[in-house]
Image (spheres, rainbow, N blue to C red):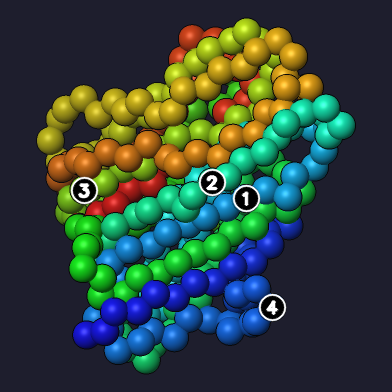
Amino acid sequence: MVYAVVSREQDITALDTATELIALGADTPNAIVVPQATRITEIRIGVTPDLTADTLLGFTTGLHLIGSCGDQWLAGPVGTVGGAAATSSGIKIGKPMIILCNIGVKAGGQINAYGFMHGEDVGSLRMMVTIIFDGPVSGQCSRFDYREADLATANTPVTLNTRGGATENDFKVSGETIKEIYCGAGLKPVAGPLAATTHFRLSGNGVAVSTDLDFQGNTLCTQDDITISGALSIEDLVKYAVNIPTKKGDLRVQAQEVEDDVGTPYAIICLGFA
C-alpha cells in the first residue's frame, strides 16, 4: 500500500461529449497509472466555467472513470452563469466537490478519466479530477452511477434517464445497497423574484423494501435584474448518507422544481453502491 495523489485536467468545449482529462497545466501525462495501491479512497471534482458573456446559462457535470477502477460514473458540481460583461460582478472562488469511496484498483493498471458538460454549453468548462489512493479516510461505496435531465415545467416530475450524453433509462441494480446519494440542479434562470426547491424521488421494482424515498436537492431563486447582476454560482450537490437495499430490477428517479418556475433547472443525481 502507498499513499498517492494524482490529478488530471482539461477544457471541456462540447456539450454532452466525453473529453478525456489528460493534461496538468503545460504537461500532458495522459491516462492515470495506478501506483502501488489497493484502492481509491477519495475523488475530488473541480469545475470552473470560462463563460460566454451576456448570456444566462446553466450546467451540470459528469465524470467517467474507466479501467483498473472498473466503470465509474460520478456527478460533479452544478452551476449557473450570466450577467452583462461590462457591469456585472461575476466573480467566484470555488472548491472541488469531495466524494469519499472504496474502489478497488490493481497496481500498475491504467485509469482513463473523461469529463462531461451537461445542461447547456457555457462556452468552456475547465474540469480537474484528483484521485487519492490508499488515503487515511475512505468511504463505503465501490460503484457509482448517475442520471440527468432538464426540468422544463414547475411541479411536474421528469424521469432522469440520460448519462454521458446518451439515453440509459433507469438505473439497473442487482442486490447492492445504496449508501450515498448526491443530487441537485444547475439553472438557466428567468427574471424573478422567483423561488423553488428541487425534489428527487426514487422508485421501481429494484427497491427491496417498500418505503418513501423523497430527497430534497438544492434551492433556486432569481431576482428582477438578473442580466446585469452578475449571476455566477458553482455549487456541490446535496449529499445523503443512506441505507437502501436493492434487488434485481430497475430504479427510477424523477425530479421536479417545486413551487415557482425559476427557468430551466438541469437536474442530476448520483447513486453510490456498496
Q: Earlier in the sequence, mark 4 or mark 2?
A: 4
What is the distance, in whole Å, between disc 1 and disc 2 at their CAs? 8 Å
Q: Residue at x 32, y 63 (%)?
A: 42
To which residue does mark 3 refer? 179
Tell me the element at label 3: strand
To which residue does mark 1 refer? 48
In the picture, measured across the screen, residue 18 lies left or right of residue 33, that is: right
To which residue does mark 4 refer? 26
What is the distance, in whole Å, between disc 4 and disc 1 at their CAs? 18 Å
In the picture, measured across the screen, residue 101 lies left or right of residue 170, that is: left
What is the distance, in whole Å, between disc 4 and disc 3 at their CAs? 38 Å
To which residue does mark 2 refer? 94
Q: Earlier in the sequence, mark 2 or mark 3?
A: 2
Q: Is residue 56 visible?
A: no
Tell me the element at label 4: loop
Q: Earlier in the sequence, mark 4 or mark 1?
A: 4
Q: Is residue 223 visible?
A: yes
Assess whether mark 2 and mark 1 are in contact (beta carbons under 8 angstroms). yes
Instruction: Point out the frontmost of discs 4 and 3.
Output: 4
Assess whether mark 2 and mark 4 are in contact (beta carbons under 8 angstroms). no
Amino acid marked by disc 3: Lys
Image quarter of residue 81: top right
Residue 196 at x, y = what percent? 50, 15
In the picture, measured across the screen, residue 84 lies left or right of residue 62, that is: right
